[in-house]
Every structure is written in C-alpha cells, then in structure tokens.
Image (cartoon, grey):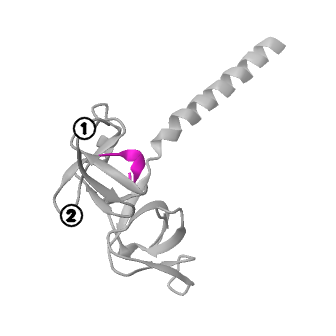
C-alpha cells in the first residue's frame, strides 16, 4: 500500500513538473516602441504619479504587464516604469546593447562586415522577429539601418527581441 501511494505521489510530482516546464515557453516576451517624443515614464500607473524620465520616439521597451490604460515596461538598461498605452506603438525596433555591433552580410562570424553600429543605435528588423530563433539563422537577426544598409547582427548584441 505504501509503495502504491509513493508511486502515485511521484507520478503526480513528475506530471506537475512537466506541466510547468511545458508551460514556461508559452510566455513570449512582448516588446513595443514609444510612439511619441517625448514619452513620459511614471513610477505608478497614473498621470498624477511622479514622472521619472522621458524617452524619445521609437525606443524599444519590454512589456512587463498591462493594466487598464497603462503598461509597465523595462528598457535596455533594466529600468522599470509605467507608460500610458497611447504612447506605445505595436511594432518592433531594436537597440544595440553592446559598445559596438558588427552587422554582417551573412549570418555567420566570418562574413564580411557591412557596417558597425554603436551602442544605443536603433535598427529595424528586416524580417519577422520570430525568425531570430529559426533553424536557418540561429542566434542572428536580419536588420536594416535607417540609412538603408542591412545585414545580420547577433541577437545577443541587441535589445527588443
């Protein structure tokens, strides 16, 4: 009897652990960009809250949680604050998070460098953001600079994916 109960507990624990592991990847990270310049960031979800700082236009932000009319966001530096939903656009921009990022002609380390982007330079994804995890170019994303140049950058060098 004790062995049968123990087996049942083990099976239940394994099932719960598997469910947790399988459920974890379902939460995809959501990113938005600022729609206005300047965009005010508050310390609470209210226009009467204390203003912390300002962002310019097209700044990529990670969405932490959305509540009625407000979104809690995290920026490339890890700073957290609240932004009114009307100040966010539902599109992607990437920002270089490393001192420099080499944008290459092909998604491989030995490919020729098309251009070098400095830290905090904005880059537009030239393909859907989900392609960054594709089997064809793992760890790379095709990007376009506002000047028109495009190429592949390592995912680890940018924020916004």
List the single residue furthest toward the bottom: 48
- Total count of labels: 2
Q: Which residues are magenta?
A: 153-161
Asked if the magenta segment contains residue 154, the reply would be: yes
Mark 2 vs mark 1, foreground winner is 1
Residue 70 placement, left or right of 149: right
Q: Which residue is mark 2?
A: 146
Q: Foreground residue, 54 or 100?
A: 100
Say if residue 160 shows up in the picture.
no
Looking at the image, tell me whether mark 2 or mark 1 is earlier in sequence order: 1
The residue that appears at 58% across and 36% down in the rendered structure is 20
Residue 83 location in percent, x, y?
46, 74
The residue that appears at 78% across and 18% down in the rendered structure is 5
Residue 6 placement, left or right of 149: right
Q: Which residue is mark 1?
A: 111
Q: Quadrant of the N terminus?
A: top right
The residue that appears at 23% across and 41% down in the rendered structure is 112
Badge 2 crowding class, 10 Å Cα cut-off, few under 14, some 14 to 19, many 20 or more, is: few
């Amino acid at each position: 009897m004790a062995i049968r109960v123990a087996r049942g507990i083990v099976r239940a624990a394994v099932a719960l652990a598997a469910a947790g592991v399988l459920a974890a990847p379902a939460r995809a990270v959501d990113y938005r960009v600022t729609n206005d310049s300047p965009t005010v960031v508050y310390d609470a979800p209210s226009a009467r809250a204390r203003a912390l700082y300002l962002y310019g236009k097209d700044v990529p932000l990670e969405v932490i949680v959305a509540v009625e009319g407000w979104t809690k966001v995290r920026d490339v530096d890890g700073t957290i604050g609240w932004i009114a939903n009307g100040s966010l656009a539902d599109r992607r921009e990437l920002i270089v998070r490393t001192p420099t990022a080499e944008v290459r002609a092909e998604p491989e380390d030995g490919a020729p460098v098309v251009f070098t982007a400095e830290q905090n330079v904005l880059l537009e994804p030239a393909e859907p953001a989900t392609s960054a995890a594709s089997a064809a170019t793992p760890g790379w994303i095709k990007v376009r600079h506002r000047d028109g140049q495009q190429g592949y950058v390592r995912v680890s060098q940018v924020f916004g994916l």
